[in-house]
Image: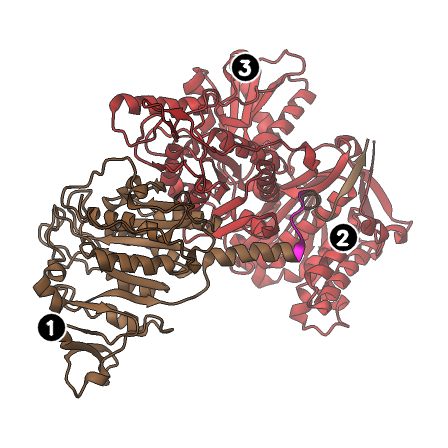
Amino acid sequence: MADTKTAESEGTGSTIEALSLVPKAEAKQSMKDFKSDQEVRWCPGCGDYAVLAAVQGFMPELGLAKENIVFVSGIGCSSRFPYYMNTYGMHSIHGRAPAIATGLASSRRDLSVWVVTGDGDALSIGGNHLIHALRRNVNLKILLFNNRIYGLTKGQYSPTSEVGKITKSTPMGSLDAPFNPVSLAIGAEASFVARTVDSDRKHLTSVLRQAAEHPGTALVEIYQNCNIFNDGAFEVLKDKQQAEEAVIRLEHGQPIRFGADAGKGVVRDPATGDLKVVAVTPDNERDILVHDAQATSPTTAFALSRLADPDTLHHTPIGVFRDIERPVYDTLMADQLDQAIEQNGKGDLAALLAGGDTWTVVG
Amino acid sequence: MTSQVSSQAEQADAAVVGGQRRSPEKDVRRLDRVIIRFAGDSGDGMQLTGDRFTSETASFGNDLSTLPNFPAEIRAPAGTLPGVSSFQLHFADHDILTPGDAPNVLVAMNPAALKANIADVPRGAEVIVNTDEFSKRAMQKVGYETSPLEDGSLDGYSVHPVPLTTLTVEALKDFDLSRKDAGRSKNMFALGLLSWMYHRPTGGTERFLRTKFAKKPAIAEANIAAFRAGWNFGETTEDFAVSYEVAPAAEAFPAGTYRNISGNLALSYGLIAAGRQADLPLYLGSYPITPASDILHELSRHKNFGVRTFQAEDEIAGIGAALGAAFGGSLAVTTTSGPGVALKSETIGLAVSLELPLLVVDIQRGGPSTGLPTKTEQADLLQAMYGRNGEAPVPIVAPKTPADCFDAALEAARIAVTYRTPVFLLSDGYLANGSEPWRIPEVDELPDLRVQFASGSNHTDEDGAEVFWPFKRDPQTLARPWAIPGTPGLEHRIGGIEKQDGTGNISYDPANHDFMVRTRQAKVDRIPVPDLDVDDAHGDATTLVLGWGSTYGPITAAVRRLRAAGQPIAQAHLRHLNPFPANLGEVLGRYDKVVVPEMNLGQLATLIRARYLVDAVSYNQVNGMPFKAEQLATALKEAIDG
């Protein structure tokens, strides 16, 4: 298993608004508390191991009672994830995890509910559930493992594969244009959208932390390497030398700069309003866009999501694109129940059954 | 036994119009039962008119049964045959079972309504037509070359030509309404006229109108004025020389407090009651579909019972959310109709595999595909029974009358929570929208459905450690523990992949899969359900008629007709279709002939023949309508003689 040497975090028991109804762990937790007794069965070298280790390592930080944590997944390689977490979990059916998790989260606000899904599961067969979970803003944390390929069915192109991809099902190249999951999520009214990379444990953990703290649906796209069917898909973002020019690290409140000596930056093109990458000069330095993940309008976050070249992945922003507060579905649902009781009193079954117009037959 | 109207308000204003003011010179005849059909354009308010007449009739204490029949289009082109909407009501001074075969009275608001319905009306019946709508153009639109009111084609009927629109407009001339708006109240004029003809109490309708139009008091008053004008028209015009009394059905009802209730309302109440009796929060995940949407609407009004209703993005998400809520410890329900069941199949299979309680309510309609959304059918039985990949047995419960939907919902919930299984509740469009009197149960008579969630370890492993096994079964019920998130120490993972008996860990072991498939089947097969009752009063019948679901009313009515004619016949009706009652095979073996009437092409008959090697005879109808008692009686007679 990858990366198990990292120091195990300790539970801090901190109060986070999104998790305020979830009971806290009574004792300090460690990474091993979150490992189930099941043998992990991903291919050796799979990026999923790194994500699993990062999640198991990060969970103690939340300090939540682990019996109040639930991982729900669909179908695909990544969807085996719940079996390896020593929490409650459900490995469901293809594409439906957001729907199932919505029922769980909206009926049990004392739970921290996580969805683990992949690019095929979330964006192809389950695309409908994903966008509706995002617009509703249910209290779910969705980890979308994107490896741009179907792994479990042995290597067909996925809805995030680049055009022209040669696979078993597309020997002459795939024809359909890919989804950009971050763009899609922003378009679906997501209140929290982030992107990170499986191999960058530190960044991954920092994004998970922000997702966990977010009230409502958080979508975290995790670029994940499938070393069997799509090896090296994100190599340009991982190779130290190339990554410097390819990766743009977004940090809220910071100017968006990257490259050697932060020599490149993102500015708004006054002619089109769109964003573009420029070499930073003393003249344009103050024009460099300061990242505002909390901007009410999703326009700039969307523009950022379009910066990357879909073929070369150059200028790929990672980090939190968008993190805004808006009403959470499960809270609203619970409020309506309270309001109904306030207005009409607690339900009285006998009165309900009797209704208005009755008549009596006496024996 | 006596019957009385209990509502004080009802008594207080029972005589807002009519009653004591009834003129003495008009003849009053006593009838034991009447069938009325209101028919008009989709926009004419026929369903509302029928509902109000039904409420008046229910509060009067008659037994009754209703059959709303309307097109799937919200507003089909006005005046056309496809746009005709009707509401049939059968009421009596005795126990009745069906909305009736042939109307004694047809109210036709336009030529289309007359044309679409007259074939069902026997000669001698009364036909009230709104002559204002019988323009040449309107008649041509539906293919009347000459006026049926004048060409003799209605000879033999007792036709009452009434200019309903003109009279309504005239009655409302003091209101500040356009002719068009005033004319809209013509359905209330018709209701008033029929209420006079059948001595219905009227206070309820006036109260209803005041509540419905509380924000538009002028409209309320206009409708009430039209309603009263209709009554007074009956009272004064010579065309209506006779009015009719149908006494309350005092003998038909055991003592108790009654109300009129439709199947979907009874089912909704049954679900709320089941949540209370199980002491579990009710969670409905649903997607709008005819004819099931009314359950979603109804449950969404009762959030003060802790009921959560989730209108999902599609059928699959509806059941998905329900299953998620079941995992979390809710009494989870999804409601739909046939096309929705098809979409939910995979999730039902997951629920079978996870062994979690889940109610799947299927209000059947005409199929295949979109079929006949507003018409009834029983053709989802085999879909419920077998419509999933793999061996995925699901218990099935079917209500037999609108009011029975309440008890059937409780029974389905009992099976779901006790055996940790999805359960099908198979109602249909006829039960859903039809209504009948219902004896309101005492809340403390309702069954106790409480269950125990798992709270601790249930197994000692080889090392002597106490562990929790999510698939260690109760030896009696074969149910697995229901361990909900939030319970310390019971953290476990479940999924749709085959799991090892006991531990629940992923297992591809051939012998284990064989064992698990057989065990899931055995769990359903072993659910104890009440023995089948056979109605064979004299024990001399050689033919058994076996039904299920909403055919109960027509079958029972047909059986009564045969017996009244001296023909012995035994009757039995299945409420549990999976598993079947343990004595079903023995019952079937007692009779020379078994006839199975169904609103499909023989789905129960197929199951019976396969399971019991009985040469069951199917009698089928798939025209979107319930069986008529007379037609069924004839068919049963032929089967007996054949």
Find residue A88 and report its horizontal and vertical position in percent: 38, 41
Q: Could you say which is closer to the camera, residue B250 or residue A250? A: A250
Relative to B439, B272 lies left or right:
left
Residue B104 visible in the picture: no
Q: Residue at x 29, y 42 (%)?
A: A32
- Which chain is displayed in red in the rendered image? B
Chain under callout 2: B
The crowding category of the residue bearing disc 2, from other C-alpha atoms within 10 Å (few below 14, some 14 to 19, many at least 20), is many
Which numbered circle lies on residue A260?
Answer: 1
Find residue B273 and report its horizontal and vertical position in percent: 61, 40
The crowding category of the residue bearing disc 1, from other C-alpha atoms within 10 Å (few below 14, some 14 to 19, many at least 20), is few
Amino acid, disc 1: Ala
Q: Residue at x 54, y 42 (%)?
A: B429
Range covered by the magenta-colored residues: A343-349
Q: CA distance from mark 1 to mark 3?
A: 87 Å
Q: CA distance from mark 2 to mark 1?
A: 82 Å
Relative to A243, B365 lies left or right:
right
**Do the residues indicated by labels 3 and 2 lie within the same chain of the protein?**
yes
Q: Could you say which is closer to the camera, residue B190 or residue A347? A: A347
Which numbered circle lies on residue B204?
Answer: 2
Q: Which of the marked residues, 3 or 2, is nearer the chain's N terminus?
A: 2
Which numbered circle lies on residue B587?
Answer: 3
